[in-house]
Image (cartoon, grey):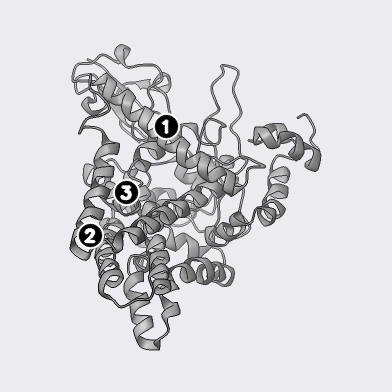
Amino acid sequence: MSAWRCPGCGYVYDEAAGHPREGFPPGTPWSEVPDDWHCPDCGIYDKIDFEPGAGEDG
Amino acid sequence: MEAATHSHDHADVELNPASWTDSKRYAWLLGLVVPLLPFIAWALVELTGLGVFWFFGPFLVFVLFPVADLLVGMDAENPPDSIISWLEQDRYYRWCTYAFIPLQYAGLVFASWLWADGGLSTIDSLGLALTMAMVSGIAINTAHELGHKRADLEKWLSKVALAQSGYGHFFIEHNRGHHVRVATPEDPASARLGESFWAFLPRTVAGSLGSAWGLERARLARLDRSPWSIHNDILQAWAMTVALFAALTIAFGPVVLPFLLLQAVLGFSLLEVVNYLEHYGLLRQKREDGRYERCLPQHSWNSNNVASNVLLYHLQRHSDHHANPTRRYQALRHVDEAPQLPTGYAGMILLAWFPPLWRRVMDRRLVDHYGGDLSRANVQPRARRKVLARYGSAGA
């Protein structure tokens, strides 16, 4: 399981946790998240802008 | 992150919370004057015997605050970078916004009682409805602050604050629609050069509603659910408004319903006139790959007028808000690169209502912002020829 991080606000999409409210149950791989999905917290960055890894600093 | 986008920081000062004090810390409590407006109006009427004070809400917002902006002036002070996360986690500031909501609904119940049993004339009742519209509209600003936060409690409080104006779809559309498409022709809530407020109003109201519904339908489709379900956040938020207005009608009688509807419509119209001025004519350019450039400081109009900023939780530091949407109001920064409005939002609203005045003040400012090249502005398609003829444009 891997994680992807919004480069703006630091939101992390963790495949293990998914984002059930957005329609991605736990275990949903990043590849199944549609390309036009935006960061659910800041709305500035699209999926394709996300960076691999959970990262530490915001 | 956006380290290059601010100024007036205090890099030379020793950077710990003890070395910096927030000059606006207690001023934020003034925001609570707004939900107290029906009580203040009532007290002024009682004290003076003058019914005209039922109109105190619009008088405060459209007369006292524009004048206060001119008298009190500007403040470009920024908290130092190293203080921001400390400042954001100070819970005092969020309690200032939470406290708005119980006062807001105490005021709505009080106003309903006044409409029903307060012995008000029709004109007094209309005045009180206008005062309640100020509460409704500015409550959308409080909801805006809360709706951007990650915590479920704050998201829920945001929905509650929106119930009075019936604008529950705002917190979907604003965060997931407006912030994504801001300063593009695709955003219903970004006004265009040559578009009057009166043309913008129906476009933003209908467009934002349609967009919010589309976003929620797409989310629910991923969950294999119909949009017509109790899981639809828009329907949940609207149900709060229906329940609220129904409860007040049952408690105080049908006489309150027209006033409740009137204050809701005028309330969300107040929010929309603020939307009108926040991004007027500003445009993000398209990159070579067909995507829009990221929202930059130059894509929002800003104002450092202290009075309006305190009233609106720093909403006028709008560029930093779009760069860092989850940042709490007390930590928002003035940005030098942002285009500046000639006065605070309260005064700009008055101009927006009178399109010839608005054009006179704002169009030239926008033309200057783009160095005369209006091909870089967000121009109303129907007005394009007229606008280009009036301002002459290189390269458009």
In this image, B174 relative to B358: left or right?
left
Secondary element at image label 1: helix
Q: Position of residue B316 (x, y in %)?
A: 50, 53
Front in this rendered view, residue B375 or B3: B375
Which one is earlier in the sequence, the residue at label 1 or at label 3?
3
**Which residue is found at the position 49% from the left and 62% from the top?**
B308
Q: Position of residue B354 (x, y in %)?
A: 63, 57
Secondary element at image label 3: helix
Between the residue at mark 2 and the residue at mark 3, the CA separation in whole angstroms equals: 25 Å
Question: What mark, if any, has residue B146 been given in the picture?
Answer: 3
How packed is label 3: few (under 14 Cα within 10 Å), some, or many (20 or more)? many
Which one is earlier in the sequence, the residue at label 2 or at label 3?
3
Name the chain letter of the residue that bears numbered label 3: B
**Which residue is found at the position 23% from the left and 59% from the top?**
B249
Residue type at tag 1: Ser
Pointer 2 residue:
B248
Between the residue at mark 1 and the residue at mark 2, the CA separation in whole angstroms equals: 30 Å
Q: Quadrant of the N terminus of chain B?
A: top left
Pointer 1 residue:
B211
Is the residue at mark 2 from the same chain as the one at mark 3?
yes
